[in-house]
Image (cartoon, coloured by chain):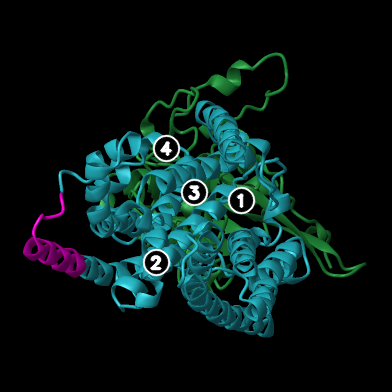
Chain colours: A green, B cyan
Amino acid sequence: MSKDTQRVKITPLSVKIPQDQLILRMQRELQKAMEKPVAQRRWAMVIDTRKCVGCSSCTVACKAENKLPPGVVYRPVIEEEYGTFPHVARRFLPRPCMHCTNPPCTKVCPVAATYKRDDGIVVIDYDKCIGCRYCIAACPYGARTFDWGEYYTDGTPVREQYELEPSFEYGEKWPRQKNRSPINNTRKCHFCLHRLNAGILPMCVTTCIGRATYFGDSSDTQSLVSELIGSARVMRLKEELGTNPNVYYLV
Amino acid sequence: MKRLYYLLLFILTVVGFWALGVRFSNGMSVTNLTSYFSWGLWVVFYIFFIGLSAGSFLLSTMIYVFKMHALEKVGRLSLMSALFALIAGLSFVLIDLGHPERFWYTLVHRNMSSVLEWEIHFYLLYIVLVVGELWLVMRDDLSALAESAQGFRSKVARWLSLGYRVAKEEEGRRKQKGTSERWVKILGIIGIPLALGVHGGTGSIFAVSIGMPYWNSSIVPIIFIVSALVSGSALVTFLYAFFGQEEREKPEILNSLSSMLVLFIGIDFVLVLAEFLVGLYGAIPADTESLKAVIAGQYGIFFWVGQLGLATVLPILLIARSRKGNSARLKGLAGLSTVLGIIAVRVNLVLPAYVVPKISGLDKAYVDSRLVYHYAPSAIEILSSLGIIALAVLLFSIAWELLPIIKVSEIKQ
């Protein structure tokens, strides 16, 4: 055996797995999708559970992006330990809204405040929502939470400025004032609709350190998400309920 | 005694309204509900009172539609309790809304696929129907009161009679009687599907929820209807036994009422048995966890003491015992015990559904006091509930004093 063949060529991981190209590709595909009429887009998310390291940076980034108060979380990461010692491992399951094709939550709303948009995003009209919390009970994924009007600094001498910052969900300004929407409303993940409209990927996708979350237009057969949805590793949560989620997991 | 009673109700009402004031100014944060445990004490009382109302109303239709003349003495009583229970029930829905000021949106922004949306329409129609029927059955006495009696009672009667007066001559009186009987019957017939819709529909609000395996069963709306009949007939039995006029037919009426109560309790028990046996046999974790919480967990006390003790075994024993000496008191106590037991039934219809996280591990995924799967009502929730109940009882008592509900004979003399 020659010396030459024995030498291992080391390429940096970032070159071997071009992560930056993935995000640029998703970004490009997002802009392409935004050029189409709303009804022709079909947003989907794919989460690679093997790449997820459970850092919860998506949860935190989402909290910051949408100025979420206590009691409200759009994308918790569920941890699970499995196997028996010494063969033990952990896996992580980030859980955004599934944006079901057949959502059980929108059906029950007594005022049609929550509905499915033509592009597949399930949204809540804060100005219409009466806060009955029926949709919270109806969602099989626990993906809806309620804004109790509380602050992280409740019970401390100072209410920090960051808690009073308005949220810009749905492209509107929502100042945080007593008994004013979204306070006393149900809130949920909306795939960062306000960011999509500005041509930017959802916050959880951008911030993911392992590039474990993918986002795109599943009606575009050339898109990255379409490619991944075709994978043999793909699964969805509670398929037996017929909700037909638009969030896919790679296991 | 009477003054003490009114004073107590008044104090409870005032305290309750203070609690409601706190609730309305501070929003839903005054409750101990969480983002995962979304419905609590107020929803429990909401379905309790809607059930009480639907049950009392269905009892009244047996009298006015199916002509159970033996029970005619309690017809107005059951309609009246239907009305006030409904008002209490609707107040509980209202205070449970995050934005109560938007309640009227339900009539403007429609979503035809929402059971809750349909229910609100049902409730409003139902309230109109109950008031209409009540007026028709009372109008002769209201007219008599307005013309004969002096003072406040007559003033109220004059106002409530809406100008209606009993005709002077026999011919006209017969005509009026025919009209009112016909309309009461028509309203009663419309009322049967409506009342079934009111409470079966309330059960369906829960039953259609695929996110909640404990509720998501077609037996749930049926249990709601039957337990409504239980609570309605129990309430009327209690009120009539303790506060009804002493009259010749009273023991007979109480006998029919209590037999009916036992029958409804029996049917209800069979349904609950079916629900539990099938659920436990299936052993699907999401459903069984709730059932276990009811039988042997944190809701066990409501099940064994409330549902089986107060609302099933005790009333049957009391009624069986009362047959000997024909005791009205024991039958009344059976009614009261059942009504209180039904509160426990309502607790167990709503709360145990929330004991299991929707996805295993979700409860530990994000640590926050509002992201947990356990709940015990806050002081404000309890006080405001007591306040609403006290107000409903107070209004009912005042109506009892002023209107010709039970004291009919007194007017005729």
Q: Are the residues flagged by discs 3 and 4 from a single subunit?
A: no
- What is the x, y in percent for residue A236? 54, 67
Q: Which of the pair A121/B232 is nearer the observer?
A: B232
The amino acid type found where label 2 is placed reads: Lys
Q: Is disc 1 on the same chain as disc 2?
A: yes
Q: Which residues are magenta?
A: B165-183
The secondary element bearing badge 3 is classed as: loop
For badge 4, the amino acid type reads Pro
Mark 3–mark 4 Cα distance, whole angstroms, equals 12 Å
Front of the two marks 3 and 4 = 4
Q: Which residue is mark 4?
A: B100
Residue A226 makes an appearance in the image: no
Q: Which residue is mark 2?
A: B73
The disc label shown at residue A133, or none = 3
Q: Chain of mark 3?
A: A
Q: Earlier in the sequence, mark 4 or mark 1?
A: 1
Q: Label 4 marks which chain's residue? A: B
Q: What kind of residue is marked 3?
A: Arg
Q: Output the chain of dot 2.
A: B
Q: Mark 1, residues whose alpha carbon is within 10 Å: few (<14), some, or many (≥20)?
A: many
Look at the picture and state if B375 lies above or below A150.
below
Using the numbered discs, state the Cα–Cα distance from disc 3 to disc 2 in whole angstroms.
Answer: 42 Å
* Element on which disc 2 rests: helix
Give me the C-alpha separation between circle 3 and circle 1: 10 Å
Q: In the displayed image of the protein, which residue is found farthest to the top?
A: A157
Q: Position of residue A179 (x, y in %)?
A: 48, 28
**Nearest to the observer: residue B96 or residue B407:** B407
CA distance for labels 4 and 1? 21 Å
The residue carrying mark 1 is B36
